Amino acid sequence: MLAEQVTGSWEPSNEAERVAVREQLEKLLLDSHFSSSKRYPSFLRFVLEHTLAGEPEILKERTLGIEIFGRSPDYDTAADPIVRVTAAEIRKRIEQYYQNPATKDEIRLFLPSGSYALQFHAPHSVAAPAIVEDPAAPRELPALVTKPESNKALPPRRKTMFVSAMFLLLLSTASFALWQLFKVSPAEQFWAPFVKSKEPVLFCIADQNQYSAITLLDATDPLRKTTLKDNLVTVVIDDVNPLIGIAGVLQNSQRSYRVQGQSATSLTDLRSAPSVLIGAYDNGWTLRLTAPLRFHFANDPEMTRFWIEDRTKPGSREWLIDRSQQLKTATYKDYAIVARFVDPNTDQFTLVAAGIARGGTVAAGEFLVNAKYIDELTRQLPANWSHKNIEIVLETQVIDSHSGPPHIAAVYVW
């Protein structure tokens, strides 16, 4: 589940409201999503009481591991991710609970990603205010309403109904204008987990230790060269295209980021902030984090044939590249995975832009930064897609080693 900050969250301000929130939690825990577990009720009751008490300093991963799961004070949170895994599963189950139309009038509980403090949303805060008119109480027409041309005054009841109708018309017009002004575009919803991050987004890109020597040019005579021994870490130029494009999205939102090679990136790095993984078969973190997903990368033992596998069709080779054939021609079809999901090992948002070959990675980067493609994607998604994990398979035609526009081949939401 993609849990994010709740707009218009409500904070209980008195004991009666706090009691109502506790009662709502107990009602939620009776549901089948939670009733068969011992961990989830213990976790939720603990974080609820400390949230209501205004004690966010208690709601840290290590403290929760000690207090709820009985871990020792010096336990290794990197090796034992029970708190993060439990929180991720609870987020998913809470969302499933509130998808039931019967819960629409209940107090809503949220566990935002990156936090262990609960948030609340009171149902009355989203309901439209009722407008009550007293038919027996006549009122003067406001100045902006033109009175009827007839010399006869409207009866009090009709006058009240007329004013009410005009007020509702003006209110709906103003509301529509405000909605048009402040509505959030699909691209903004897609990128929200990354542009709202308090920590710099981590780019994890493919790197290669390929060269042991470097050629330098003479400053006074660039035609004169010398070769020196060196230990260079190189980056594939085609992987730089999505890096620059996605970094531009973050910069436009005034968000910072940092770039690391995959060989220098640790699980601790990925747990510290949302991450963007670029490249597939030359990026070990992409292969690790996408391996459990429905669409994931695969290859034969000889590593000459590479494909994107659909877990529901394990024998299918619909999205395959034969590298021996690819080397013979610069014209072929490439395929890529674009995924936006919360990884259970890091409990952070992860974005993947990775092709089987270079053309697919370029196409994935183009897809992510072009609002037209995001709009096309969201037309295939459910209404609440912004709170979901999303995985897309793209295909692109590569001609003379240059990739064409990306096309959506498959979409999966969970």
Image (cartoon, grey):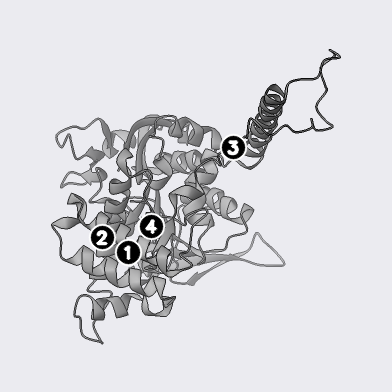
* Front position among marks 2 and 4: 2
Q: Nearer the viewer, residue 318 or 254?
A: 254
Element assignment for label 3: loop
Label 2 sits on what residue type? Answer: Glu
Q: CA distance from mark 2 to mark 3?
A: 35 Å
Q: Is residue 139 rendered to the left or right of residue 193?
A: right
User: Tags 2 and 3 in contact by the CB under 8 Å rule?
Assistant: no
* Front position among marks 2 and 3: 3
Q: Nearer the viewer, residue 31 or 284?
A: 31
Q: Residues within 10 Å of mark 1 (few under 14, many from 20)?
A: some
Label 1 sits on what residue type? Answer: Arg
Q: CA distance from mark 4 to mark 1?
A: 14 Å
**Relative vertical location of residue 94 with respect to residue 202 in this rendering, above or below:** above
Q: Is residue 289 rendered to the left or right of residue 253?
A: left
The residue to which callout 2 is attached is 26
The residue to which callout 4 is attached is 110
Element assignment for label 2: helix
Q: CA distance from mark 1 to mark 2?
A: 6 Å
**Residue 148 visible here:** yes
Mark 2 or 3, nearer chain start: 2
Quadrant of residue 382 in the image? top left
The residue to which callout 3 is attached is 132
User: Tags 4 and 1 in contact by the CB under 8 Å rule?
Assistant: no
Mark 4 or 1, nearer chain start: 1
Q: Is residue 35 rendered to the left or right of residue 5?
A: left
* Front position among marks 4 and 1: 1
Q: CA distance from mark 2 to mark 4?
A: 15 Å
Mark 2 or 4, nearer chain start: 2
* Front position among marks 4 and 3: 3
The residue to which callout 1 is attached is 22
User: Tags 1 and 2 in contact by the CB under 8 Å rule?
Assistant: yes
